[in-house]
Amino acid sequence: MATDPIAPLFEPFEGGGLKLKNRIAMSPMTRWKSPDQFPGPEVAAYYRRRAENEVGLIITEGTTVDHPVSSYSERVPAFHGRALDGWRRVVDEVHSAGGVIVPQLWHVGIMRDPRTDDYPNRHLPSASPSGRFKPGGKQVFEPATKAEIQGIKDSFARAAVSARELGFDGCEIHGAHGYILDQFLWGALNLRDDEYGGDDVARTRFAVELIAAIRAAVGPDFPIILRISQWKQQDYKARLAQTPQQLKAIFQPIADAGVDIFHVSQRRWWEPEFEGSEWNGAGWIKHLTGRPVITVGSVGLSGAMSVTELGEHAGVSADLSPIAKRLAAGEFDIVAVGRALLTDPMWARKIKERRFDDLIPFSKDSLEKLY
């Protein structure tokens, strides 16, 4: 009898404090559908539809922590104040459908755009390690003070406590794509000469202290996921690490601070991270740190992710056997799906039921509403 090539995607997972019915996660995707930073009933229904249709783990869109300059839009949901009432409804809707959900806690750092007037506290300078938006760019703000750094750490810890109190199944910290944690890790942007700057290991201090603060606040049993990436919005070719040894030097201290699961973002999941091995970034992080990992990057699509492609037709790919094969081999543990699930809330169910002809391809129209 022939082996089902995609069966590994629907095997249960237990690890990092999570128990999931299958290996499919919904990747966090900013939707701009929360006016006044409040996730309303339509947002709750949006996540519920995925929980009803075989998504094993839902990671919400990025939701900003309680820090004055954490956000870049009034349409991005906050994770403090009255917005927590909206998130309570999201949790209840997802749990009533049998789903598992974590919020992605977010601080954008210097990624706020001063050319727009759509974000809170526009009059305040953005927080960042060195006040620079991109490598080689001019300094546009003063570097964050130690007091400001402490305030950011405290805001993440408060948000994680709120997530636990609301009944979320864990939390994810956004440490990827050139946002605040990533800005401190990236030597091209972190030019500090104090204890938060320096070599690869020294630049992990902010992330280590932030994760440790969250762990102390939520206790030992609340899962903490950390999303990381080599690539940045400012530079797709950027790399934190050129070798496996360098990757371990950066992320082992962060893992030891209290990370349960790493969510490793790359633009194309199938691309090797280093020469000499087919492992992708998630595979290397799992091998080096011993933590369970989530892989992500153009899963289920015929086109790779990029900012300029977000409004274009990305096509659909029903051939999931390559990723399922590498999942079964233990390279990674969970597969996160982005745009394919943004367009089609029934994507995971259709895959499970082998209804490949019913899959809906991503298109720019998908960004206009919450399907």
Image (spheres, grey):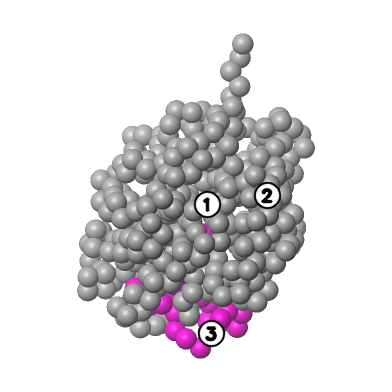
Above/below status of 2 relative to 25: above
- What label sits on residue 169 in the rendered view? 1
Q: Amino acid at mark 1?
A: Asp
In which quadrant will I find the N terminus? top right
Q: Using the numbered discs, state the Cα–Cα distance from disc 3 to disc 1 in whole angstroms.
A: 33 Å
Q: Using the numbered discs, state the Cα–Cα distance from disc 2 to disc 3 in whole angstroms.
A: 38 Å
Q: Which residue is outermost to the right? A: 358
Q: Is residue 72 left or right of residue 45?
A: left
Above/below status of 224 relative to 24: below
- The answer to which of marks 2 and 3 sits earlier in the sequence is 2
Expressed as whole percent of the image width and height from the top left, the position of residue 148 reads 36, 79
- Which is in the foreground here, disc 2 or disc 3? 2
Q: Amino acid at mark 3?
A: Arg
Q: Nearer the viewer, residue 49 or 167?
A: 167
10 Å crowding of disc 1: few (<14), some (14-19), many (20+) = many
The residue tagged 2 is: 96
10 Å crowding of disc 2: few (<14), some (14-19), many (20+) = few
Above/below status of 73 relative to 19: below
- Residue located at (50% from left, 36% from top): 13
Which stretch is magenta? 103-132
- What label sits on residue 122 in the rendered view? 3
Q: Using the numbered discs, state the Cα–Cα distance from disc 2 to disc 1 in whole angstroms.
A: 13 Å
Q: Quadrant of residue 38?
A: bottom right
Q: Amino acid at mark 2?
A: Ser
- The answer to which of marks 2 and 1 sits earlier in the sequence is 2
- Which is in the foreground here, disc 3 or disc 1? 1
Expressed as whole percent of the image width and height from the top left, the position of residue 341 reads 66, 48
The stretch drawn in magenta includes residue 249:
no
Expressed as whole percent of the image width and height from the top left, the position of residue 136 reads 36, 72
